[in-house]
Image (tube, helix red, strand yellow):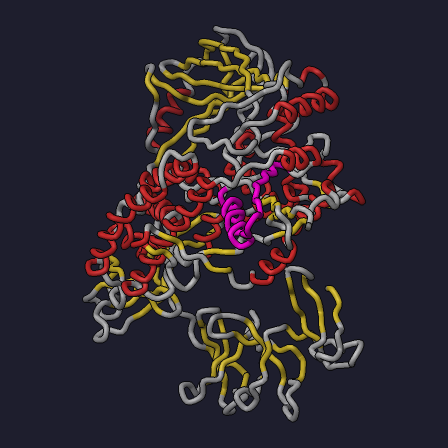
Amino acid sequence: MSKPLLIVESPTKVKTLKKYLGDQYAIAATVGHIRDLPEKEMGIDVEDGFKAKYSTIPGKQKVITALKQAAGDTELVYLAPDPDREGEAIAWHTAEILKKKGRIFQRVLFHELTRNAILKAMESPIELDRNKFEAQQARRILDRLVGYQISPLLWRKVKGGLSAGRVQSVAVRMICERERAIQAFETEEYWSITATLEGSAPPVFSAKLVKNLGKKIKISDESTAMGIRDELSQQAFVIDNIVNKTTKRNPLPPFITSKLQQEAIRKLRFSAKKTMSIAQELYEGIELGSGGPVGLITYMRTDSTRISAEAAGEALALIQERFGKDYAPSKPRFFKNSKKVQDAHEAIRPASVFVTPEKTEPYLSKDQQALYALIWKRFVASQMTEALIDGCTITIQAGTYQLTATGSVIKFPGFMALYLSADDEMDSESNPAKTRLPILSKGETLILKQLEPKQHFTQPPPRFSEASLVKALEENGIGRPSTYAAILTTIRGKAYVEMVKGFFVPSELGFIVNDLIIASFPEVFDIEFTAKMEDNLDQIETAEAASLEVLTRFYEPFKQRLDTAATQMISMKGVGTLTDLDCPLCKTRKLHIKMGKNGHFLACNGYPECKFTSNYTRDEKGRIQTVEPPPESATDQVCGKCGQPMIMRQGKFGPFLACSGYPGCKNTQSVTPAGSPQETGISCPEPGCTGKLVQKMSKRGKVFFGCNRYPDCSYAMWDKPVNQECPLCHAKFVVEKTSKKEGTFLTCLNPDCGYKTTI
């Protein structure tokens, strides 16, 4: 009889588990999901109770064969993919594939990969959680019903290749609505006045004008500001009141998924996807010296701030040892969760606080170390004493005007000695007023050193960054810990939004698709409705709702909307979006924004009578600015095909050389930023050819290398040629390749050679 089989998701986990479990179990990995809904069809039988049609994921048949071989004739299989809905789905699909008469399947949940946690989990396996699997399956079915039925509608009404997603489209909606709020925002001018004052004791300090005649002051223009300044300059500045107050600032709780992503984006400049990828590595185990892989953090997909008493106790011991008893509270600090929290896992924390960042630094990559240190510091700080802040507010009377000066200093740093959030860091950098004020007395007359009026303008709401979008999704109940990074990755991969200086900006296509689907499916892409659907999925997991009931309740009105949209959704093909710009050519019609194969452009709506077109950009307010196309320019290059002069043109992917004989000759060539052909200096390897290899660009914008004598010679290759002789077979050049496993390396194209070296 074969020994019990333990199945996990990741090969890295296999190494970590073997370190602690030895040879008691055969251990294998699914390497992620092994079954899913088919890519080329919806895969949902609506008439048969929304039955899902699963198939093996392409490329996973070898994994399945290996799992079956590993199972052999064993009677006991432990299923230990990640302890969330996706992991539960992997466990169910694996059990289905390995199902055999007399074989028992048990679920094991590893919330951290330490010796004690692993042994404890193996000693207390549980049954597979059907409700959790049903919740995951219901999400996949909902996403398929929406995506696979609305997307074809967009192909017919807008253009091919577009897609809609149940949750992703709501995120795009939020971005579009924010952009429109920015465009509609009317900037208002206002002024502030700051007085620099000197008292009986140093230092000199600043006070801000806040009231006149007991009412909040509002200065709307320069003349008013200057009038008040002149009036203030004639007044005596007398201290009316002084309030000293010591406040406590409590530490933040340890990270949940959304807060980890937000903080890593803002402090480390990681994307949400990168943050979760590195966190997964830290959770699954890292080699620390010769001792084998060690799981460094707890499970990283969680919405709970709960921590174990054991972890809190370890943190207190470390705090006393490292910082002293004044920094360690008398008892552990525990944080309350909100009512909607699933609380399936602990907060994200170090598996052991005694594995300090100093100990891990020699073994972790730069990014791994940065994220581990962030998690470690946040957790340890959460168990430290409060910070004490001495604050002082001085109220100053100057005739009918009132000014205030505020200052604060840290009396006792507490947790702030170890950790400041990104918000705290920004606050301390942007608020220089947070300094100690002089010790003064009520009734004291101050010396006016300077009065500074300053012009300001109200600012529109900011665009979403990755961090603020995750925060907005969380606050609105959109998505869950396991989906935030996927949502951001998906919308960044679409043509609906783009990143401009770190902020999401909707494209013209994004606005068009957003408006169409919201008009046709107002409930489906409603923020509140989407949040309620997340609650329904949670209720399926807790057995408070049945998946069939939730799916039926959603689908019936959705199908009606879908049928209506098929006939009533406006077709944007060949129509365009009207602007308020007059056509500069015919001067009688308006310009439209139209879509072409190379993107959006402006065109006169009088086409074909008027054929005016222009590229355009938008300013910060979203106003359209026409862009003059760069003129074609002559070059000293000659077409290698027909011998006519080559001219410089502007295309979708930048400047390029084109034959002046077009359309009779369609020869083109890539150029360097300076405008010369991107030559490699390497002779074409095609026998009998006298041409050179040059860099070119495909119709889809992908770089490749081909002979400059095309079409007489059609030799081409994707790999970058390097003008270096192969040291083994003496081939005239080698090529540069890149793979996830090996990184970037040089290799020889000769199949009989085998030369390879890492760059």
- For residue 394, side relative to residue 168 (left or right): right
Question: In which quadrant is the C terminus drawn?
Answer: bottom right
Height in image: 186 above or below 590? Answer: above
Provide the residue span drawn in magenta. Answer: 85-112
Q: Nearer the viewer, residue 81 or 153?
A: 81
Q: Which residue is drawn at the image coordinates 66% and 85% (left, top)?
A: 685
The number of numbered badges drawn on the structure is: 0
Can you see residue 373? Answer: no
Taking the image as shown, residue 639 lies to the left or right of residue 226, namely right
Picture layout, residue 613 above or below residue 193: below
Choose between 35 and 481: the one closer to the eye. Answer: 35
Residue sitting nearer the eye, 366 or 690: 366
Q: Is residue 111 magenta?
A: yes
At a point 65% along the width and 93% down the height, the residue shown is 688
Image-quadrant location for residue 626:
bottom left
Q: Does residue 563 lie above or below 465 as drawn? A: below
Residue 635 visible in image? yes
2 lies left or right of 467: right
Residue 148 image position (x, y, % from top left): 35, 58
Q: Position of residue 656 (x, y in %)?
A: 50, 75
